[in-house]
Amino acid sequence: MSSEGAFELSPDTQGRASMEAEIPVSAAASTLGPKGASSLGLCTLTCERALIGTATVRSYFVGTDDLVLDEPDETVSGDT
């Protein structure tokens, strides 16, 4: 389960990333630190070797014994 996400772009991102369709934006992602009960993922975005953005996502791992797969009762009536 991911609970937190942050995405930051450099001021010239729009101009750099949309200069030409042939110039790709590349993404690389990895975990930051060891994986435990939670982990922090880090993603970097580059365009023509220039760093144009970063993103982080905090994830928490839920054991299968803790999952509740029951669906809630319908709360919206089909009548208008």
Image (spheres, rainbow, N blue to C red):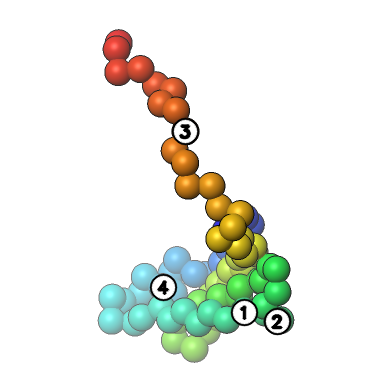
**Which residue is label 3 attached to?**
72
As helix, strand or loop, the secondary structure at mark 4 comes to helix
Distance Cα–Cα, label 2 vs label 3 = 36 Å
Asked whether the beta carbons under mark 3 and mark 1 sit within 8 Å of each other, the answer is no
Name the amino acid, label 3. Answer: Pro
As helix, strand or loop, the secondary structure at mark 3 comes to loop
Asked whether the beta carbons under mark 1 and mark 2 sit within 8 Å of each other, the answer is yes
Q: Badge 1: how crowded within 10 Å, few (<14), some, or many (20+)?
A: some
* Badge number at residue 66: none
Q: Tell me the mark number nearer the camera, choosing from 2 and 3.
A: 3
Asked if residue 5 can be seen in this view, the reply is no
Front residue of 54/60: it is: 60
Residue at x-position 57% and y-position 81%? 30
Distance Cα–Cα, label 4 vs label 2 = 32 Å
Name the amino acid, label 2. Answer: Pro
Asked if residue 12 can be seen in this view, the reply is yes
**Which residue is label 2 attached to?**
34
Return the x and y of residue 17 as percentages of the image width and height. 41, 73
Name the amino acid, label 1. Answer: Thr
Most extreme residue toward the top, as rendered? Answer: 80
* Picture quadrant where residue 23 is located: bottom left
Return the x and y of residue 36 as percentages of the image width and height. 70, 74
**Which is more N-terminal, label 2 or label 4?**
4
Distance Cα–Cα, label 1 vs label 4 = 25 Å
Q: Badge 3: how crowded within 10 Å, few (<14), some, or many (20+)?
A: few
**Which is more N-terminal, label 3 or label 2?**
2
**Which residue is label 1 attached to?**
31
Return the x and y of residue 2 as percentages of the image width and height. 58, 59
Image vertical order of residue 59 relative to residue 44, above or below: above
**Which residue is label 4 attached to?**
17
